[in-house]
Image (tube, rainbow, N blue to C red):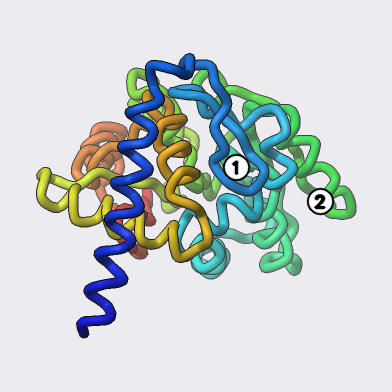
Amino acid sequence: MKSNESTSKRIDESLRDAELEAAMHSDSHSSSCNMSVGDAIESTNAAWTFGGNVADTFDGHVSKSVPFYSIGHDLTCKLSDYFLSDGSTVYEIGTSTGVLLGKLADHNQSKKIRWVGLDTEANMIAKARQRLENYAGIELEVADVTNYTFDTADMILSYYCIQFIRPKYRQDLLDKIYQALNWGGAFILFEKVRFPDARFQDIFTTLYGDYKLEQGYSPSEIVGKTRSLKGVLEPFSTQGNMDLLKRAGFQDVVPFMKYLGFEGLLCIK
């Protein structure tokens, strides 16, 4: 018991030291100074992007940064059994390098399905095309979903993507998603969320810091990633996302996966 307490204390102290060091040097370094955020990725203050060379190491980075990342993929594949049949169309918003889309296609290989992966970053789509070049029925597009027109679909996915879309566009996007789905179709939404009060937010933010240290990230890399995401990653609370979904028209919404501030919602039209 005492060993666990001392380990936790050292982790908290390491994170605080890194935060203090970043604050002490903030005046001597311009806001455009590159910071390492781990996995050979660099960013600057309040300027995280999925462009540039991020696609080269993205898969490893995101699988360590998001708890149970692959398990969420597996659950999504299993959920697809309930909504897809021959002739179905499926969209993935923020397909990145195409990992989830490939898993879904493998899982549903006995069905003739149209898969559409959308991403704003050309480098991500290029990686996805390399990964999925031997798959039939997969379309990959460089597209901004805030002004994209969806065809009618049986399933639409967003795997930790909408949290990066400016809040002012989210309601319109969810409205479009609801309208595009066939009756009985599914919207599967994974998002990082904020907690309903400061006490919970403090507890789970600290636990997430512990998690990232356990994945091998240094305190300075953790602080660097946090600084880079300011104003870029803007998560809502669970209730905030529920409110968006209800206003779009979804009445049947249930959380099916949750760990710290990371959760998956199944929404059925």
Tell me if I can see residue 254 in this picture: no
The amino acid marked with disc number 2 is Arg
- Residue 25, compared with residue 245, is above or below; it is above
- Residue 5, compared with residue 46, is above or below; it is below
Tell me if 153 is positioned left or right of 8 in this view: right
Q: Position of residue 81 (x, y in %)?
A: 55, 68
Mark sitting earlier along the chain (2/1): 1
Query: Which label belongs to residue 144?
Result: none
Tell me if 97 is positioned left or right of 174 in this view: right
Q: Position of residue 46 (x, y in %)?
A: 44, 23
Q: In percent of the image, x 73 and y 65: which residue is there?
A: 106
Q: Secondary structure at mark 2?
A: helix
Query: Which label belongs to residue 91?
Result: 1
Tell me if 40 is positioned left or right of 150 in this view: right
Q: Position of residue 77 (x, y in %)?
A: 57, 65
The amino acid marked with disc number 1 is Tyr
Based on the displayed image, in which of its 4 quarters is residue 18 positioned? top left
Q: In percent of the image, x 46 and y 43: which residue is there?
A: 220
Tell me if I can see residue 5 in this picture: yes
Identity of the residue furthest to the bottom in this view: 1
Q: 154 or 195: which is nearer to us?
A: 195
Q: In percent of the image, x 58 and y 59: which residue is there?
A: 84
In the rendered image, which residue does mark 2 sit on? 131
